[in-house]
Amino acid sequence: MDQQPVSEFFKFALGFLVFITVSFGVTFAVNSYSISQSADQQAAAAIKAMLEPLK
């Protein structure tokens, strides 16, 4: 009977750690995607600015 509360706590702790890990993973993925999109937009704007005087 004494083992059950400890087991429940460890299940909770494991679930909480999985939740935090997934949250950090999603945050990192979204941040990486956002940075890559920003870099692509900056590169496109730089190319457009370089080609504009040629028109």
Image (tube, rainbow, N blue to C red):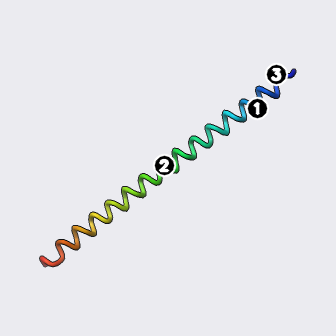
Q: How busy is the neighbourhood of tag 3: few (under 14 within 10 Å), some, or many (20 plus)?
A: few
| Apparent side of residue 34 relative to residue 5 in the rendered image (left or right) | left
Q: Which mark is residue 3?
A: 3
Q: Residue at x 13, y 78 (%)?
A: 55
- Label 2 SS: helix
Which circle's residue, 3 or 2, is located before the other in the chain? 3
| Apparent side of residue 23 relative to residue 41 in the rendered image (left or right) | right
Q: Tell me, yes or no, whether the two marked residues, 2 and 1, touch with CB atoms within 8 Å.
A: no
- Counting from the top left corner in percent of width and height, residue 8 is at 77, 30
Q: Which residue is drawn at 86% across and 22% down?
A: 2
Amino acid type of disc 2? Phe
Q: How busy is the neighbourhood of tag 2: few (under 14 within 10 Å), some, or many (20 plus)?
A: few
**CA separation in Å, label 2 and label 1:** 28 Å
Q: Tell me, yes or no, whether the two marked residues, 3 and 2, touch with CB atoms within 8 Å.
A: no
- Label 1 SS: helix
Residue at the disc numbered 2: 28
- Label 3 SS: helix
Residue at the disc numbered 1: 9
**CA separation in Å, label 3 and label 2:** 37 Å
